[in-house]
Amino acid sequence: MWEGLEAVDWAGLEHNYGSAEDVPGLLRRCAGQSPEDAQEAAFELLNLLFHQGGWICSAAPAALPFLLRLAADPHVQSRRAVLELVSRLAAEAGQVAERFLDPGWSPTWERALPDVLSLLTDFDPEVRRTAADVVGVCASPGALLLPALLRCWRAERDLVNRLDLVLALGQAVRREPVGGRSDEVSALLRTLLDSPEPQLRLAAVHALTAGDSGLAASQLELVLDAVRDPSVELWQRTSSVETGTRGVQHWTAGLFAGESPAFALGLLADHPDEEQRVGGLAQAGGLLSQWRSPADVLLPAIVARLDDPATEVRYRAAELLSCLGPSAATCADMLAELLGDTATRNSRKGETVAEAALWALARMNDPRCVPGLAERVAGNRSGFASVSASYGSAGSGHYPALPALHEVLIGLPDHAELLLPGICDRLGTTTDVGILNQLCEVLAAWGPAAKVAVPQLLDLLGDDQRWAAAATALAGIGPAGNGGRELLLARSTVGGGADAELAAWAYWQVGGEPKPALKVLGPAATEGRFSHPALRKLAGLGPHAAPFAGQLRTMVGAADTWTSVEAAYALWAATGETENTVPALLEAVHDLAEGTYLPVMLPAVRHLTRIGRVAQPAAHLLSDLPTCDRRLHYFGGWRAFTEDEAIRTAVDELLTAAD
């Protein structure tokens, strides 16, 4: 097994963590007698040779022959784990750019391919299915792979292994040159659409769809029958998919491109298995986070899950309605009935169904959310996030997380009068600076509607630990907080940095003179390393900021888009100039017309709206956006919906202002 191992200059080769001199020892450990140590060594090799992918290191081709010898030896405890590493490397080698592929990989793989194919007939069914996965993902042409795969198909009786073989056949038959067996493989896959085994039918659809994009839609009933059949659990034992019910649902949803709700609607139909019902809502959420139009079709099926016997299903239904928010307002009465549902999810936070319903009613601006939110403001146990929940990414699907409590409250200025007494009480009693900061963010967002909280905020200004939160709130509330001017002015002259900027900004916002604010904010905006927050504040000083116009002009068009956008707006606010500012803002939103959304685009559109009719080029660019069906968002979860609503509202206002 180890012939030639010592002849390799491992120290001269490289893996993800540097010199590969540790690889021989790990290879030998993979063949050791201890199953635990062998598996640990295989995992360490996976980390060293593959890690997170992105390249094929020079140590990988050197290790490949020894990995395959380990995989072929029936006495090796870690043979399947080792073969899974080969699968990762083979797949990555077919995807990375040539400059990231070690020159030794391709010739080494060609020499090793017969050894890989021989594993398709191994006595161990787990090794056979892992070998099928390797063959399916590798970059070798179909002419070399299809004959071996067809021989194995005829001999294989293990149903799980046959699923892996079908997928491998579907992948190999698309790799040129495919050789003379491609028609035979295509005919076999078509025949399997009529197989008595539901999962073989599903495997055939997956195998054929790459060459026939309309197949899945035409076989929707077949696909749904298979995904909703108890035998779907077979996929958990495969090497190519290796996932349960919800994973198969998600994998199969990828066959249905575009906004059609048909697959998600089929998954939402009644089913005795809770996992199936949960998965149906997950797929509906994923579709709705990408497209707007399916909402009308899916809404009744989502609402039907509000009285499901399973806590997780009721929670997810309510949470998804909260994402839809105003567009699902017709369901508010049914959500209000869940306000007493204290059933708790099996999750780290232990969110309740009632809290998902509270969030949904808050998104609909329904006053019935106020009592429950007031209880949580008072400090009662809450399943809402303690801090802003993870933003996630737009492509990560929908995950049903509740926001932090202050993120819920920020959207409820219409109910400030009823919520403020509890917030004011908490301002005076909490010793948690994090909670204080969050409550003050709410007050700042509510603006003048929160002026009743000013006395409590003024009391906090003298506290070195809590004054910044109070200053943030007072800046948002405005002149009603003018009793804090002197303290804010004094803090604006101490220490510099973000604290001085905040104090100077709040001083100006509550009615102070512009000169002290300019003294701090001007340099911070035009000289600071991270200048765009200070630039936004400087813009609020309007014409008073004109002395900094020269510096602002040099910042318009900066490589950092945030800096460019905020500098352009600050320059316009200070001087009224549009010659350079409007083009810079227009450049920032250019890709929005094509359906690409970045967070910086929202303030850019709002700045263009304030500029007014001169911003007509932007209005013309974005005139078709209101009819775009794709959701415009950068983050995932509930933010996918709120970002979409915010940018669409901003564009509507721009179109009106520039008319």
Image: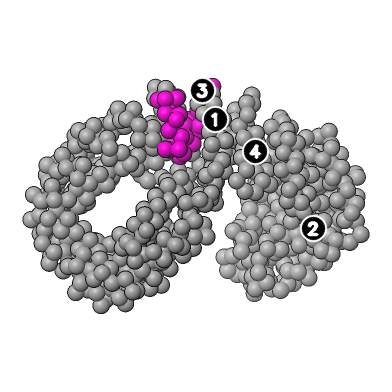
- Residue assigned mark 2: 174
Query: What residue is rendered at 19% in x and 52% in y?
Result: 475
Q: Earlier in the sequence, mark 1 or mark 2?
A: 2
Identify the magenta region.
Answer: 309-336
Is residue 383 among what the camera can see?
no
Amino acid type of the residue that numbered disc 1 sits on in the rendered structure: Pro
- Residue assigned mark 4: 262
- Residue assigned mark 1: 300
List x then y, in percent, for residue 330.
44, 30
Query: In whole angstroms, how far apart are the C-alphas of marks 4 and 2?
Result: 28 Å
Residue 305 occupies quadrant = top right
Query: In whole angstroms, how far apart are the C-alphas of marks 1 and 2?
Result: 41 Å
Q: Earlier in the sequence, mark 3 or mark 1?
A: 1
Q: Residues within 10 Å of mark 1 (few under 14, many from 20)?
A: few
Amino acid type of the residue that numbered disc 3 sits on in the rendered structure: Asp
Element type where label 4 sits in the image: helix
Q: Residues within 10 Å of mark 4 (few under 14, many from 20)?
A: some
Q: Residues within 10 Å of mark 3 (few under 14, many from 20)?
A: some
Comparing 512 with 197, the one in front is: 512
Element type where label 1 sits in the image: helix
